[in-house]
C-alpha cells in the first residue's frame, strides 16, 4: 500500500512539473502572439482552444489531473488524444514484463542425446 502511495505522489509531482512547463509555454505563446499582433496581420486564422471533452470515469482522479495528462499527451503526439481510461500500473507488472522480454531474448539451443556418428 505504501508503494502505491509513493507511485501516486511521484505521479502527482510529475504532473505538477508538467503544469509549470505548460504555464511557461503559455506565457511564451502569449508573448509571441502579442509580438506578431504588433508586427501586423500576418496570421491567417485565430488559434482556437480545443473543445472540452466529456467527463471521464477517472476512478478518483480530478478533472484537472485528467486535463493535464491529456495536455501532455497532446503535446507529445501533436494532436488531441481520446483518453478512454487512465490506470496506474503497479511496479510488479513492469518487472514481470521485463523478465519475460529478457527470457524471450535468450537463444536456447536444443541438445540431442543421440549422436550423429
Image (spheres, rainbow, N blue to C red):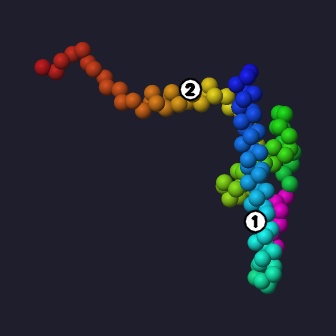
**Which numbered dot is residue 96?**
2
From what the image shows, is residue 51 above or below residue 36? above
In the drawing, does residue 116 fall left or right of residue 15? left
x, y percentage for residue 88?
72, 33
Residue 48 is one of the magenta-drawn residues = yes
| Callouts 1 and 2 close, C-beta under 8 Å | no
Tell me the quarter of the image containing the C terminus. Answer: top left
Residue bounds of the magenta highlight: 45-51
In the rendered image, which residue does mark 1 sit on? 28
Give the image quarter of residue 108. Answer: top left
In the image, residue 75 lies at what x, y percent? 70, 56
Count neighbours of disc 1 (C-alpha within 10 A) and say few if under 14, some if 14 to 19, many if 20 or more: few
In the foreground, 4 or 106:
4
* Magenta stretch prevailing secondary structure: loop
Residue drawn at the location 78% of the way across and 70% of the way down: 31
Q: Quadrant of the N terminus?
A: top right
Q: Position of residue 106 (x, y in %)?
A: 39, 30
Residue 4 vertical placement versus 14 (above, below): above
Is 61 part of what is drawn in magenta? no
Amino acid at each position: 500500500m505504501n508503494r502505491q502511495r509513493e507511485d501516486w505522489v511521484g505521479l502527482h509531482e510529475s504532473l505538477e512539473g508538467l503544469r509549470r512547463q505548460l504555464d511557461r509555454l503559455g506565457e511564451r505563446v502569449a508573448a509571441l502572439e502579442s509580438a506578431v499582433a504588433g508586427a501586423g496581420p500576418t496570421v491567417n486564422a485565430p488559434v482556437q482552444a480545443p473543445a472540452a471533452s466529456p467527463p471521464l470515469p477517472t476512478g478518483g482522479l480530478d478533472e484537472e489531473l485528467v486535463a493535464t495528462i491529456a495536455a501532455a499527451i497532446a503535446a507529445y503526439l501533436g494532436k488531441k488524444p481520446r483518453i478512454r481510461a487512465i490506470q496506474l500500473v503497479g511496479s510488479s507488472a513492469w518487472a514481470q514484463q521485463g523478465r519475460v522480454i529478457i527470457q524471450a531474448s535468450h537463444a536456447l539451443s536444443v541438445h540431442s542425446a543421440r549422436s550423429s556418428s
